[in-house]
Image (cartoon, rainbow, N blue to C red):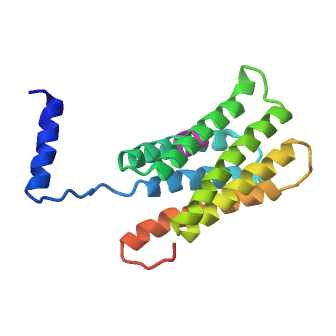
Amino acid sequence: MSDENTLNIDILEIKEKGFRLFDTTANSAVLGFAGLALAAVMLGLQGIGLFGDALVVISMSIFIGGFAQVFAGIQLWWKGNNFAGTAFTAFGLFWFSFAYILIAPFGALIAGASSMAWFLLFWGIFATGLTLGTLKLGSKILIVVFVLLDLTFFLTAISFFGVNLSILPGIITLLLGLASLYASLGTILNECGYKLPL
């Protein structure tokens, strides 16, 4: 008997005997929101002019924004959550690609303003599609995070198209990071017994 048949028999036996299976793994969305939060806060702080170098942004983009969100997305896919699995994995990959664009000038061609604008514009369109999904999920903080994410992409794209928005994209990116931090920590604290609105 193959392993596949054994697995099917085991599942049938569990159903026949009335056993119920429960998913006891942690909510990995907390990690995904933390990754988004910490990377976006650093990018936002750079965007409003608190520091000029990109090294911290690159590091946070790869090791926090990228890996944390991809790990969270994969775990959420295993849980059968298509929305969160797609969102976290895709945006984790965004952080990797964004970090590469920042690193590339050290040894390759520099991304032009126009290509950056189109890159961010299409990420904004993708994010807006997911934002429509959040409206049906019922979480206010999730809606806030995604609306701020949309604004971050679109405002930054507009600035790369040549419109002077000053520090507005940086402020919105910082607010995105803070909202994501609230989503992450709020979920953790609520599991500890607090009653924070999410």
> Visible in this render: residue 142?
no
Q: Residue sitting at 44 percent across and 79 percent down?
A: 195
**Which residue ends up furthest to the top in the rendered image?**
108
Q: Residue sitting at 38 percent across and 49 percent down?
A: 80
Residue 116 point in image, percent of width and height:
78, 36
Residue 184 point in image, percent of width and height:
49, 62
Check if residue 101 falls in the magenta segment: no
Q: Is residue 61 left or right of residue 30?
A: right
Q: Residue sitting at 75 percent across and 26 percent down?
A: 105
When the figure is inspected, residue 151 is found, relative to residue 110, above or below; the finding is below
Residue 74 position by quadrant = top left
SS assignment for the magenta stretch, majority: helix
Residues 54 and 177: in front is 177
Q: Which residues are magenta?
A: 61-65
When the figure is inspected, residue 119 is found, relative to residue 150, above or below; the finding is above
Q: Residue sitting at 81 percent across and 39 percent down?
A: 117
**Which residue ends up furthest to the bottom in the rendered image?**
195
Image quarter in which the N terminus is found: top left
